């Protein structure tokens, strides 16, 4: 927790957006679980009860909840990335003596990309 407190000192002006990203992401996760619950109810009505009217009701709810969940997840990712880029900029501005020749974000993306292909090639 000490690390997060130190990092939040660098982004005190956009700290609210970090908390909003956490809140929106948790709402998204709840809606996704709720959508999967409706998938269970849909299959139960369709296969066990053979009640097609109720199954159509559940199918519309499934699409609605999972779509809203995906949109909220994308929104929370955009907000958290905005905060992360602000953090990177503030770290560069406050520590000019450090050699940050490569962007932190680009380095993280590159490492993820390399790991993905290494795992992919390993399991071929």
Image (cartoon, grey):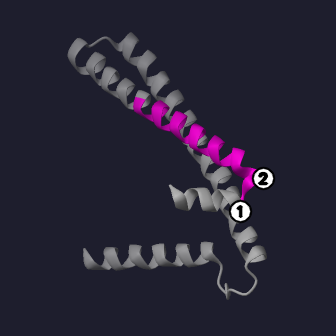
One can see residue 124 in this view: no
Tell me: residue 109, above or below residue 3.
Answer: below
- The crowding category of the residue bearing disc 2, from other C-alpha atoms within 10 Å (few below 14, some 14 to 19, many at least 20), is few
Looking at this view, is 6 or 45 the one in front?
6
Q: Secondary structure at mark 1?
A: helix
> Residue 71 occupies which quadrant of the picture?
top right
Looking at this view, is 37 or 124 the one in front?
37
Give yes or no for residue 74 being in the magenta stretch.
Answer: no
Tell me, yes or no, whether the two marked residues, 2 and 1, touch with CB atoms within 8 Å.
Answer: no
Tell me: residue 99, above or below residue 93.
Answer: below
User: Residue 21 appears at what percent x and percent y?
Assistant: 62, 45
Q: Which residue is mark 2?
A: 13
Give yes or no for residue 30 being in the magenta stretch.
Answer: yes
User: Residue 75 appears at what percent x and percent y?
Assistant: 64, 45
**Stretch in magenta:** 10-33
Q: CA distance from mark 2 to mark 1?
A: 8 Å
């Amino acid at each position: 927790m000490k690390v997060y407190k130190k990092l939040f000192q660098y982004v005190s002006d956009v700290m609210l957006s970090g908390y909003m990203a956490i809140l929106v992401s948790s709402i998204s996760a709840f809606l996704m679980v709720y959508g999967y619950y409706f998938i269970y109810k849909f299959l139960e009505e369709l296969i066990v009860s053979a009640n097609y009217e109720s199954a159509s009701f559940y199918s519309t709810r499934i699409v609605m909840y999972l779509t809203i969940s995906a949109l909220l997840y994308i929104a929370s990712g955009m907000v958290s990335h905005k905060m992360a880029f602000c953090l990177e900029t503030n770290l560069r501005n406050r520590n000019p003596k450090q050699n940050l020749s490569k962007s932190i974000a680009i380095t993280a993306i590159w490492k993820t990309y390399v790991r993905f292909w290494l795992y992919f090639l390993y399991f071929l």
